[in-house]
Image (cartoon, grey):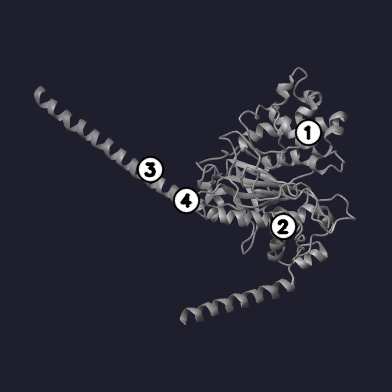
């Protein structure tokens, strides 16, 4: 009997194992079904929203043209720049969940991004503006950016990425739908006519409001015209900046020492670079360190009577140059002599060493007498181009070229580039008359005429081919 009772225990033991196996199988099936349900409902929420969702910019309305965007950040902190191209990806909340959502709505229009995001050296153009003279200059500046960027994208390698106009007036204007724009506030508690004092403050706000997919950006101004595709001039991760021969820190050793240290030698003062902030290439990470130093240095110079009197309208440029020294970012910086041309003092599209210029600077008056010589005497001048003459109204279309006795190809190029842009931009005649951007009947008629001309040309080409 004792031997018979032993075999009866084994079936009961096997039965308990079978029950456990069935339990685990059922649990696995239920878990798998729940996972499939979660994936199907969660995926539908993340797949919608169009192509712009990956950048964190959601459209407020659809249709043609450039539209305003709302920048949305989900969660207490976003991850920053991610991926090889630096694209900013915003996570999507699950449906019916109630996550903590921090939403910032800023005045920002559609940004111009392109395939250059696959290029790790791609950069973003950031141009600061305020005032009407910057208004018309920005339209021409952006026209030439787009044209040269299109040419750049047709080349084997292209560094040109997106574009943003930073409007530091605190209010949107009538170019919001024409040029990608972020509106920031002017410098508070500073009632001054020195408008460029706003620039460091404007860039600090822009950096906080908007994240760009590019790792680098170049600071520009509205009076810079893109002559050709512009490469990234950085020296590896060190900044790249245009040479300004009139920024000469070692001519003001004692003043410079006020801001870099009274114990610094003359040789150390010479390490402050001959640059301004624009045009300058820099990484976003470097700029986060430099921006407050630039702002504080510029304010210190502005409030220092000796420095203010010495540097006057270029004090903000000295502020940036000194700030790079204070931040240690002058080390390995590339200072580029041929990044920016300064007509009428520069005359050709290449510098004396034969290197091509990339940007035209419209800052200096171009004034010539009847012999083709430059003159500061307006009564002797027979031909003049000075952007300051268009502080209230933009320049008209078809500006006159300088006479043949003027031997300066860059001055001719300035006029040619302005004329091309003003002829291509819609309703420029109405813009000249009203100083406002509006659609006009003239543009509609001109567009129709252009379409007829193109059709006629196409028809003629077809007939010629048939013949």
Disc 4 is placed on an element classified as helix
The span from disc 2 to disc 1 (Cα, nearest Å) is 36 Å
Q: Nearer the viewer, mark 1 or mark 4?
A: 1
Q: Nearer the viewer, mark 2 or mark 3?
A: 2
Q: Badges 2 and 3: C-beta atoms under 8 Å apart?
A: no
Earlier sequence position, callout 4 versus callout 2: 4
Crowding around mark 1 (Cα neighbors within 10 Å: few <14, some 14 to 19, many 20+) is: many
The span from disc 2 to disc 3 (Cα, nearest Å) is 74 Å
Q: Report whether 10 appears left or right of 402.
A: left
Front one among 461 and 52: 461
Q: Residue at label 4?
A: 43
Q: Residue at label 2?
A: 412
Image position of 174 with respect to 275: above or below = below
* Residue 93 coordinates in the image, percent (x, y): 54, 46
Picture residue at 59% right of the left edge, 51% below the top: 229
Picture residue at 60% right of the left edge, 48% below the top: 230
The span from disc 1 to disc 4 (Cα, nearest Å) is 50 Å
Q: Report whether 366 appears left or right of 51.
A: right
The span from disc 1 to disc 3 (Cα, nearest Å) is 62 Å
Q: Badges 3 and 4: C-beta atoms under 8 Å apart?
A: no
Q: Nearer the viewer, mark 4 or mark 2?
A: 2
Examine the image and state in which quarter residue 438 appears. Answer: bottom right
Front one among 431 and 190: 431
Q: Which mark is residue 31?
A: 3
Image position of 435 with respect to 119: above or below = below
The span from disc 3 to disc 4 (Cα, nearest Å) is 18 Å
């Amino acid at each position: 009997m004792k031997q018979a009772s032993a075999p009866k225990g084994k079936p009961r033991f096997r039965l308990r194992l079978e029950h456990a196996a069935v339990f685990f199988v059922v649990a696995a099936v239920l878990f798998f079904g729940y996972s499939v349900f979660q994936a199907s409902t969660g995926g539908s929420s993340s797949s919608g929203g169009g192509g712009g969702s990956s950048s964190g910019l959601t459209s407020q309305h659809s249709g043609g043209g450039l539209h305003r965007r709302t920048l949305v950040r989900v969660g207490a902190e976003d991850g920053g720049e991610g991926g090889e191209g630096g694209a900013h990806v915003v996570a999507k909340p699950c449906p019916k969940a109630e996550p903590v959502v921090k939403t910032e709505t800023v005045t920002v229009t559609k940004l111009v991004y392109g395939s250059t995001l696959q290029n790790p050296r791609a950069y973003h153009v950031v141009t600061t503006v305020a005032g009407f003279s910057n208004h018309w200059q920005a339209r021409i500046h952006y026209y030439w950016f787009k044209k040269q960027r299109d040419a750049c994208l047709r080349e084997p390698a292209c560094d040109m990425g997106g574009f943003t106009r930073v409007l530091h007036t605190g209010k949107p204007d009538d170019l919001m739908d024409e040029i990608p724009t972020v509106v920031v506030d002017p410098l508070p508690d500073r009632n001054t006519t020195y408008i460029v004092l706003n620039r460091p403050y404007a860039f600090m706000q822009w950096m906080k409001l908007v994240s760009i997919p590019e790792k680098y950006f170049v600071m520009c101004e509205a009076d810079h015209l893109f002559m050709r595709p512009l490469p990234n001039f950085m020296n590896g991760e060190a900044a790249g900046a245009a040479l300004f021969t009139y920024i000469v820190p070692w001519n003001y050793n004692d003043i410079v020492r006020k801001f870099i240290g009274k114990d610094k030698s003359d040789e150390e003062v010479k390490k402050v670079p001959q640059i301004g902030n624009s045009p300058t290439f820099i990484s976003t990470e470097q700029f986060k360190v430099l921006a407050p130093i630039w702002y504080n240095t510029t304010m210190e110079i502005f409030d220092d009577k000796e420095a203010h009197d010495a540097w006057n309208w270029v004090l903000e440029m000295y502020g940036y140059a000194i700030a790079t020294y204070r931040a240690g970012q002058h080390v390995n910086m590339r200072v580029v002599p041929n990044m920016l041309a300064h007509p009428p003092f520069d005359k050709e599209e290449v510098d004396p060493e034969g290197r091509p210029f990339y940007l035209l600077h419209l800052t200096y008056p171009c004034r010539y007498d009847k012999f083709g010589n430059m003159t500061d005497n307006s009564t002797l001048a027979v031909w003049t181009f000075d952007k300051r003459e268009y502080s209230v109204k933009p320049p008209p279309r078809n500006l006159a070229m300088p006479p043949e006795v003027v031997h300066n190809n860059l001055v001719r190029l300035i006029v040619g580039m302005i004329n091309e842009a003003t002829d291509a931009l819609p309703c420029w005649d109405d813009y000249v008359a009203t100083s406002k951007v509006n659609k006009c009947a003239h543009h509609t008629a001109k567009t129709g005429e252009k379409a007829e001309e193109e059709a006629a040309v196409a028809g003629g080409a077809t007939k010629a081919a048939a013949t």
